[in-house]
Image (spheres, rainbow, N blue to C red):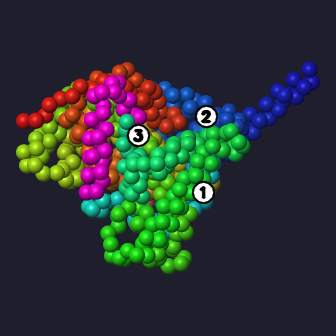
Amino acid sequence: MEWIIGCWVLIGIVIGWYWLKEKKLEKRGVPKGSLGWPFIGETLDFIACGYSSKPVSFMDKRKSLYGKVFKTNILGTPIIVSTDTEVNKVVLLNQGNIFIPAYPKSVRELFGKNSILHTNGSPHKRMHALILGFLRSPPLKARVTKVFENSVKLSLATWKDNNPIYVQNESKKLTFDVLVNTLTSVGPGENLNFLRSDFQEFIKGLICLPINLPGTRFYKSLKAKERLMKRMMTILKERKESMNFTDEKAPINDAVDLLLRDSSESSEKQSLPLDSISGNIIEMMIPGDETMVTAMTLAVKFLSESPVALQKLVEENIELKKQKIDSGQDYDWSEYMSLQFTQNVISETLRMANIINGVWRKALKDVEIKGYSIPQGWCVLASFISVHMNEDNYENPYQFNPWRWEKMEATVNNNFFTPFGGGQRLCPGLEYSRLQLSIFLHHLVTTYRWVAQQDEIVYFPTVKMKRKLPITVTSINTTP
């Protein structure tokens, strides 16, 4: 009997301590909210909403109770969630001096201390500018256009004989292989197959319990990362050796060339060691396995459910295809990007998909934004999904409506549209991603009609289709 009373007393003390802690935070000006249950906080509700058809409901419920900025506790970590565009902008713009990226322990350990994700200040600015300039360069866009066009055409040619087609799987094959080629010039073959296999094993551990014991998910991912690093180091050493016999003014063909040349031209202090370059290139492969795959798959899903939008997209792209047939000329990357309704479809897909639903940042010091106090050491979750699905920002936000972008600008300066993040850590591959999506949609809608089977989106731990989006395709004739 006494131990039962003791347990209740202990529970009462813990709950009382939590209550006093929340009251102290409120007095300091920390946003209103609830830290939930001791230790687990509001994690269970957060995960449950992630598995529902409306993951933003976790944010919406608390926003209605506490306002656009509130505190909560997820995965045992007290955090401040912002669904306010102005607060999000301040968080995104103040990198390095006030806020730094905050990632789960599994991500930190898998990427390592030299990861570009953990780099701040001048080194990060320099690396970001280097990669951004490379991915935006017209020569690279021309090369990617040709390589991705050929890959899409070859892939689509096999679809008619393999119904049903699982769009998520087919997209993954396309994007990963082309991205690896862009980064390393590795083409089809045994080396690419090993890279793909090890990368799949590696990325599975990004969101898991960081328990490094044989047989655990985390252990397997660490071993896969070791194999990836070994293969990448071999590629780098061979390339570095060949560069000794190459003209210094020769064009840069891929990210390996870019980073090796920059390293050789930099001062000893700025120069990156080969293992850091290897790690950074592996990190750059992630969009080919996650972001682009999801965007392509969900574009097909949303268009399948929006026949009017699909018909408009088909008409625009068939017109371009007929022009190319008549002229006998190859496609230029700028022609894909000039398809206005196609770009609207892409913008609307990115808004509704919320592939990156928010970013986590850690406060380096006490800071106040719009009257909200954020204590030093606390994490802030700048929620993008809450902004994208807010009816104050978008009329009928749950309706797929590409026409809304005729009146709006899908630019990096639009605080209401942040599918690629923002500030100094804006994804450098945003134009690269749009180009690939444009090429994929163009050749898909001018080659096939399709019927999608019933499927649903799963939002946790990452955005994916539950059944990989099976479709049945039928060939069409677009010749004049």
State the residue position of label 3.
172
* First along the sequence among labels 2 and 1: 2
Q: CA distance from mark 1 to mark 3?
A: 25 Å
At 40% across and 76% down in the image, what residue appears?
245
Q: Quadrant of residue 173?
A: top left
Q: Nearer the viewer, mark 2 or mark 1?
A: 1
Q: Residues within 10 Å of mark 2 (few under 14, many from 20)?
A: some
**Residues marked 2 and 3 touching at CB (< 8 Å):** no
Q: Position of residue 473 (x, y in %)?
A: 27, 26
State the residue position of label 2.
43
* Quadrant assignment for the C terminus: top left
Q: Given the current orientation, which residue lies at the most extreme right position?
A: 2
Q: Given the current orientation, which residue lies at the most extreme front position?
A: 190
At 71% across and 35% down in the image, what residue appears?
38
Q: Quadrant of residue 423?
A: bottom left
- The label on residue 112 is 1
**In the image, 470: left or right of 307?**
right
